[in-house]
Amino acid sequence: MEEQQSATLLGQLLLASGAVTPEELRSALHRQQGGVLRVGEFLIGMGALAPRQLERALQTQARLRGSPGQPRPFVLVVEDDLEVCALIDDVLTGAGYRVGVAQNEAEAVAALLASDAVLPSLIVLDLGLPRYGGVELLTMLRKSEPTRELPVVVLTGHPEKESAIRERGLEISEFLAKPVPLPRLVEVVETALREAEAVVAPVPS
């Protein structure tokens, strides 16, 4: 099972980097006899991947999966696309985070504002939500005391909506237009959490 998950994550990294096409990756996964390296060896053999590219992908994969002792902040992903949810969940879980998913505005509000809710450390927010949209949800979160200061990373297929966020003066950690390379998403989440921790950390006397 671990090898299968590793092969899946490696494939996602390779596709995101543009190192292989979906057809090449499907062929490699279909023919593999076991293990991530077999996938890489097959791709190298067919000329679709250079050895150095495989090495970089494996290094990135190891970083994404994190270390056993790594703290596990809670990240809430608000995204209505099931495939995108699964991808983000897999990548962030592999990076050492606990991940919760809300697929619409109502689920997000319930997850964030219920009386017994455990607030996330960060929200990854899609703007193309089905009912009111991510901008309206972000507006509501910034008006609510429990969620006013939560770091939010916007991930959207509608880059033109950045202006609506800026015009309303809504604070976000980063605005990312889809498709986003997976290492970049992890990097942005890590940076946003570090910056949030720096703001709340007590100043040494």
Image: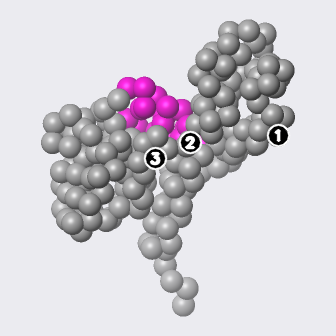
Mark 3 or mark 1, which has the lower sequence index?
Answer: 1
> Does the rendering let one see residue 62?
no
194 shown above or below 37: below
Label pair 2/1, CB-CB below 8 angstroms? no
> Does the rendering let one see residue 28?
yes
Is label 3 in a helix, a strand or a loop?
A: strand
Image location of residue 175, percent across then percent down? 39, 56
Residue flagged by tag 2: what amino acid is it? Leu
Which image quadrant is residue 165 in?
Answer: bottom left
Residue flagged by tag 1: what amino acid is it? Arg
Residue flagged by tag 3: what amino acid is it? Phe
Q: Which residues are magenta?
A: 82-101
Image location of residue 72, percent across then percent down? 55, 47
Residue position marked by numbered label 2 in the rendering: 182
> Crowding near pointer 1: few (<14 within 10 Å), some, many (20+)?
few
Residue position marked by numbered label 1 in the rendering: 52
Q: Is residue 180 left or right of residue 78?
A: right
Q: Main secondary structure of the magenta part?
A: helix
> Crowding near pointer 3: few (<14 within 10 Å), some, many (20+)?
some
Mark 2 or mark 1, which has the lower sequence index?
Answer: 1
Q: Is residue 94 magenta?
A: yes
Image location of residue 63, percent across then percent down? 69, 45
Residue position marked by numbered label 3 in the rendering: 74
Is label 1 in a helix, a strand or a loop?
A: helix
Give the spatial CA distance, label 2 vs label 1. Answer: 19 Å
Residue at image position (65%, 20%) is: 25
Residue at image position (66%, 28%) is: 20
Is label 2 in a helix, a strand or a loop?
A: helix
> Crowding near pointer 2: few (<14 within 10 Å), some, many (20+)?
many
Q: Is residue 8 left or right of residue 168?
A: right
Give the spatial CA distance, label 3 vs label 1. Answer: 34 Å
